[in-house]
Amino acid sequence: MRGRPFHIVTDWRIQGNLSDVARLLLRMEDWPMWWGGTYRAVKLRDDGSYLVRSKGLLPLSLRWTARILPQSLPYAWVLEMAGDLNGHSCWSLRQAGVLVEVENDWYPFGPPLLGSLTAPSHRRAMAQGQQALHAELARQGRMGDPPMLPDPPAQPARLSAIQ
């Protein structure tokens, strides 16, 4: 059952350069190494999708599949999810001086109760992700001044939700 969508926006500001941040976020199979508090296992499949096992606040392990849909890499992409988590997540990145502004618009589907149960877990996971991404960039020595990047292609400030 698809259910009704709800929407959660997360904004991060990470010191570093956009290409390094995008590289880490787009390599989902590496998430358990640096975002291990949330992502227990991620396996890249032959068809380019991912098998994901994640954990939230509740003592449950979630199993789902994910597919990255490029919009304007490395500046924007959509992550489609199916399984214990259904919906999509729109990622947008923008270089702002020495910071990368990361926006994640998450649109999970399910009954209205799902939002009240899932939102706190998602917010915690994303807070852990911001800290973990910062730590991974520091570990890799990627916290210096960002290089000059070409201007991103013209696009709206936010990706529109997939209908």
Image (cartoon, rainbow, N blue to C red):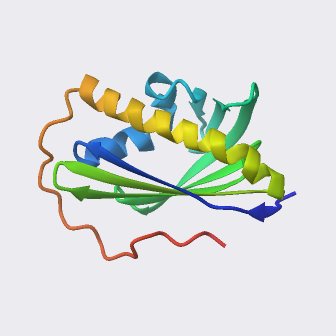
Q: Position of residue 133 (x, y in %)?
A: 37, 34
Q: Residue furthest right?
A: 1
Task: Examine the image and state in which quarter residue 75 appears.
Answer: bottom left
Task: Examine the image and state in which quarter residue 40 appears.
Answer: top right
Q: Position of residue 97 (x, y in %)?
A: 16, 54
Q: Position of residue 106 (x, y in %)?
A: 59, 56
**How many labels sit on residues?**
0
Q: Residue at x 74, y 50 (%)?
A: 116
Q: Quadrant of the N terminus?
A: bottom right
Q: Residue at x 23, y 49 (%)?
A: 99
Q: Residue at x 68, y 31 (%)?
A: 57
The answer to whether residue 38 is left or right of residue 113 is: left
The residue nearer to you, when weighing 154 against 109, is: 109
Indicate whether 63 appears above or below 89. above
The answer to whether residue 83 is left or right of residue 123 is: right
The answer to whether residue 66 is left or right of residue 115 is: left
Q: Quadrant of the C terminus?
A: bottom right
The answer to whether residue 154 is left or right of residue 4 is: left
The residue nearer to you, when weighing 163 against 3, is: 3
Q: Position of residue 124 (x, y in %)?
A: 56, 37
Q: Residue at x 19, y 35 (%)?
A: 143
